[in-house]
Image (cartoon, rainbow, N blue to C red):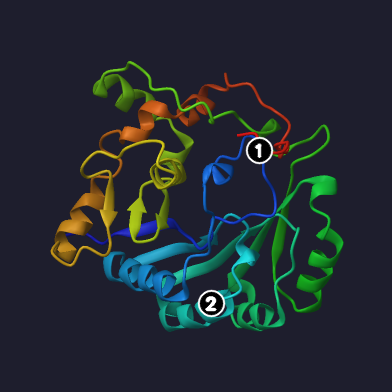
Amino acid sequence: MDSIIARRLAIVTTTRCTLRCKLCSNFMPKFVKPADVPYADIVADVDHAFELFDRIEWLQFVGGEIFMNRDMADVYNYCLKYRGHFDKLVLMTNATILPNAKEIEALGKYGENCQIQISDYGELSHKMKETCMLYEKHGIPYIMKTYYGDAQHFGGWIDNSKLLKSNETTEQAHKRTLGCQQVKLKNMHCYRGQLNRCSQSCFMYASGFVKPNEGDFVDLNDASMSTEKKREIIENFYKYPRASCFYCVWSEMEKNVLPRFPAAEQLAGNDL
């Protein structure tokens, strides 16, 4: 079997978040009992990932808000054992909470091969100044994406929250999803032992709003399935649409026909 390389593998470490965004593409407000993923489960996902992939270009950790989970310093240190098998460690944050001293120390061990991606939501990202000063002080690389005002990244957010199933055939859905940005990026997501081909599949299934088909994801914890079989499923990830594809509007982004909305509009009270 040919080598399998993951462009981006994002491991979800928490479904807790400091914000309640109305159009959250990760459906965080829909999780009834948001929680951190335990350290043992996260590193088990890491171990399984490096059993299946010959190389990972970007090893990402995402949430929710990544810095809500205070066990992550130990995770970053653990990942050093695989340092020769991935190119860059990437984190995503909304600049509402600062990493602790242990996290900063652990991230510093990656040098230029670490990148913090900051989503700047203006007033909502109330720790932005302190965040940037902290990373600059310790020489930790970061980039910012602006999501407020008149020049929002990608023109703002899209609305993928309705979860309405299309009446497409499998062939029609496959043709449509070939142009999907998620498919082009091959941005795989893993949550509690389930490896999915994209973030939308991951969070639609994890939140319980869409039921996956057989073969839609790899169960990393399934000891009865061989490594070869799991790799085979991964190789077929982009050859047919997932159950989630029939509920997703991401593929329409390529046509630039989807309306954009101001990012990070907050839900009021118990609204969903």
Q: Which residue is mark 2?
A: 76
Is residue 178 in sight in this rendering?
A: no
Sequence-wise, the earlier of marks 2 and 1 is 2
Q: Quadrant of residue 97?
A: bottom right
On screen, residue 15 versus residue 67, left or right, reads left
Q: Residue 175 location, x and y as percent?
A: 32, 24
Q: Residue 49 location, x and y as percent?
A: 34, 66
Q: Is residue 26 above or below residue 166?
A: below
Q: Quadrant of residue 132?
A: bottom right
Q: Which mark is residue 18?
A: none
Q: Which residue is mark 1?
A: 270
Q: Residue 40 location, x and y as percent?
A: 41, 76
User: Residue at horizontal 62%, vertical 35%?
Assistant: 23
Nearest the eye: 31 or 107: 31
Q: Residue 56 location, x and y as percent?
A: 41, 64
Q: Quadrant of residue 148?
A: top right
The type of residue carrying mark 1 is Asn
Element marked by disc 2:
helix
Q: Is residue 215 above or below residue 115?
A: above
- In the rendered image, the quadrant that contains the N terminus is bottom left
Element marked by disc 1:
loop
On screen, residue 202 versus residue 16, left or right, reads left
